[in-house]
């Protein structure tokens, strides 16, 4: 049995092995530790943008997994691999807009940290597409296609716009790389782990014949637990907080983050005097105004161009109700 037939068989065996172990809380390689988010659930205006999530635990070590991005998973949308929510996008900083993702009011999505070493992907892609095996004939690309369970790895990479290592720059390209081996289709976080685990179990054979530019293991780390992800509900209003026995008060802020001004949508079941205050990160009031509001929804524009860049909190109070929304000044 030649080396690449062994590669094909080993990949199938590894697939079965990892299928039985995808319930592990943390998925890693190279001894890396995954980063965690706070598990919060936030309502988000359709045209708003998420505030960049701050990890409660940072991934490590940075020299093993130097690149960290956020994967966006759409709830109630099963990935083609049938292993969980479909990954619909990635983000370098976790700031995504539901509207730009094509979502609608009522949709729910989550963000999870994914850390990896993009240089390893670049090296492997360059070798697969352009190197020749140490022995045998042809190139790594054609040899791999002949042995792979799903032929067309290199054609799939080219179809995704990956012609060499310079075309590999972020998580989207990593997903294209893995999709070339799995036959395409949408991927879940569990499926992403499975694909990387399968490749890692087989990559030593490719490396031995000079088809990975020396990469023997792709380093990565992510956390499988939804309780450690950030969740968002696309809504026409934000989450509300109310005092015991008080009527509901809701607000929606757009845009967020902002440059000079914000439009604040306020919905209240009781009209009357309402006060809008903005606090800085230390709790100091930096803006205040009072308005007479009617029952129902209304829009108030706040000019905040004089504020310095940073995190603030908009608080609206009235009729014994209070609601607070985090806002970010660019």
Image: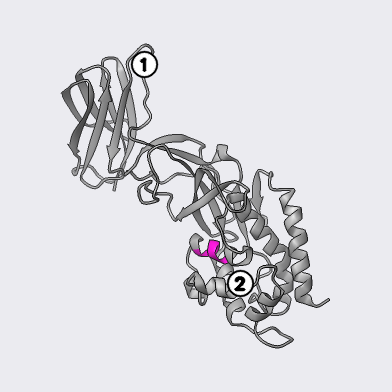
Q: Nearer the viewer, residue 130 or 305?
A: 130
Structural crowding at the residue carrying mark 2, measured as other residues with C-alpha within 10 Å and reported as few (<14), some (14–19) or many (≥20): many
289 horizontally vs 166: left or right: left
User: Helix, strand or loop at disc 2?
Assistant: helix
The stretch drawn in magenta includes residue 73? no
Give the residues in magenta.
Answer: 173-177
Question: Which residue of the protein is positioned furthest toward the bottom in this rendering?
Answer: 137
Q: Which residue corresponds to mark 2?
A: 153
Question: What's the residue at 18%, 43% (across, down)?
Answer: 306
Q: Looking at the picture, how far across and down is residue 156, in whole percent?
A: 56, 71
Instruction: Give above or below for 176 relative to 84.
Output: below
Counting every numbered tag in the picture gives 2
The stretch drawn in magenta includes residue 174? yes
Question: Which secondary structure dominates the residues rendered in magenta?
Answer: helix
Q: Which residue corresponds to mark 1?
A: 243
Asked if the residue under mark 2 is in contact with the one under mark 1, i.e. CB atoms within 8 Å, the reply is: no
Depth check, mark 1 against mark 2: the one in front is 2
Residue 113 seen in the current view: yes
For the residues labelled 1 and 2, the Cα–Cα distance comes to 58 Å
Q: Looking at the picture, how far across and down is residue 69, in whole percent?
A: 49, 54
Q: Work out whether mark 1 precedes mark 2 in sequence or the reverse, and give the earlier one.
A: 2
> Which quadrant of the figure has residue 145?
bottom right
């Amino acid at each position: 049995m030649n080396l690449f037939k062994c590669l094909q068989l080993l990949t199938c065996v590894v697939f079965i092995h990892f299928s039985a172990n995808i319930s592990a809380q943390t998925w890693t390689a190279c001894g890396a530790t995954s980063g965690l988010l706070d598990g919060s659930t936030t309502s988000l205006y359709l045209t708003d943008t998420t505030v960049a999530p701050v990890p409660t635990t940072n991934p490590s070590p940075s020299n093993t997994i130097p690149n960290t991005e956020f994967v966006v998973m759409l709830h109630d949308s099963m990935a083609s691999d049938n292993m969980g929510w479909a990954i619909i996008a990635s983000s370098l900083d976790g700031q995504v807009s539901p509207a730009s993702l094509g979502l609608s009011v009522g949709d729910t999505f989550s963000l999870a940290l994914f850390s990896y070493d993009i240089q390893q992907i670049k090296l492997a892609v360059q070798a697969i597409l352009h190197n020749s095996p140490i022995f045998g004939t042809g190139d790594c690309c054609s040899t791999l296609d002949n042995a792979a369970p799903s032929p067309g790895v290199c054609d799939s990479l080219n179809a995704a716009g990956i012609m060499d290592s310079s075309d590999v720059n972020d998580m989207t390209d990593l997903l294209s790389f893995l999709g070339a081996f799995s036959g395409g289709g949408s991927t879940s976080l569990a499926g992403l782990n499975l694909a990387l685990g399968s490749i890692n179990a087989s990559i030593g054979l490719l490396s031995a014949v000079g088809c990975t530019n020396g990469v023997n293991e792709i380093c990565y780390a992510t956390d499988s637990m939804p309780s450690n992800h950030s969740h968002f509900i696309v809504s026409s209003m934000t989450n509300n907080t109310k005092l015991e026995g008080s009527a509901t008060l809701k607000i929606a802020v757009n845009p967020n983050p902002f440059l000079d001004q914000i439009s604040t949508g306020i919905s209240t079941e009781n009209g009357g005097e309402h006060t809008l205050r903005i606090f800085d990160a230390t709790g100091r009031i930096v803006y205040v105004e009072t308005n007479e509001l009617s029952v129902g929804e209304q829009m108030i524009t706040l000019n905040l161009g004089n504020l310095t860049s940073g995190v603030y909190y908009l608080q609206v109070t009235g009729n014994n109700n209070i609601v607070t929304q985090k806002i970010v000044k660019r």
